[in-house]
Amino acid sequence: MKKIGITSLLTIASIGTIALGGISFADEFGNTEPTEGMVNMDNYSPKLRITEQVGGGTWIYGFNGTKHSSAYQHLTKKHSATAKNGNGAGKRDTRAAGVQAFSQVNSTLTGNTVWWNNDVK
């Protein structure tokens, strides 16, 4: 019978963690709040508009006629909002703390996504 070393066990554990969805790290204060998020809009109603409190800020996303949009505001951190369609069109809007970031793009039949981020460098 072959013995498995500690290095092999750590490698197997690391691969398993990555395969199951990644690792959540805490900041210097022990917080594990996410710093970004994404929603695929393909299965949502064209009349949808949602407001969520995420990452310490306010995220509003949804449809506006033939477009979909993402707006995110964080009061103490530089942040961004992104809207993309299935063709890859769209833009990321980055703003200073306290200013709302807003991105809007023409929707396609599939591949429409919206994003927020509060860890912008």
Image (spheres, rainbow, N blue to C red):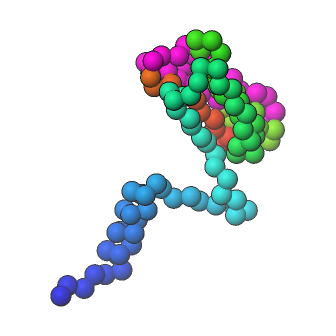
Viewport quadrant of the C terminus: top right
The residue sitting at 69% across, 31% down in the picture is 50
Q: Toward the viewer: 98 or 104?
A: 104
Question: Who's the residue at 65% across and 57% down the image?
Answer: 32
Q: How many marks?
A: 0
Residue in the picture at 37% in, 62% down:
15
Q: Is residue 50 left or right of residue 9?
A: right
Q: Is residue 13 visible?
A: yes
Q: In which quadrant of the rendered view does residue 27 lie?
A: bottom right
Work out whether residue 94 can be spotted: no
Q: Quadrant of residue 68?
A: top right
**Residue 35 horizontal/vertical position (percent):** 64, 46
As for residue 101 lying within the magenta part, the answer is yes
In the picture, the quarter occupied by the N terminus is bottom left
Q: Is residue 80 above or below residue 104?
A: below
Side of 95 relative to 15 (left or right):
right
Q: Residue at x 66, y 28 (%)?
A: 61
In this image, 99 relative to 111: left or right?
right
Q: Quadrant of residue 53?
A: top right
Q: Residue furthest left?
A: 1
Quick one: 25 or 109, which is closer to the camera?
109
- Image location (x, y in percent) of residue 76: 80, 41
Over which residues does the magenta segment extend? 81-109
Residue 95 lies in the magenta-colored region = yes
- Residue nearest the observer in this picture, 29 or 115: 115
User: Where is residue 91 shown, x and y percent of the image?
Assistant: 57, 21
Q: Above or below — where is 47 with respect to 80?
A: above
Position in image of residue 28 (x %, y %): 70, 61
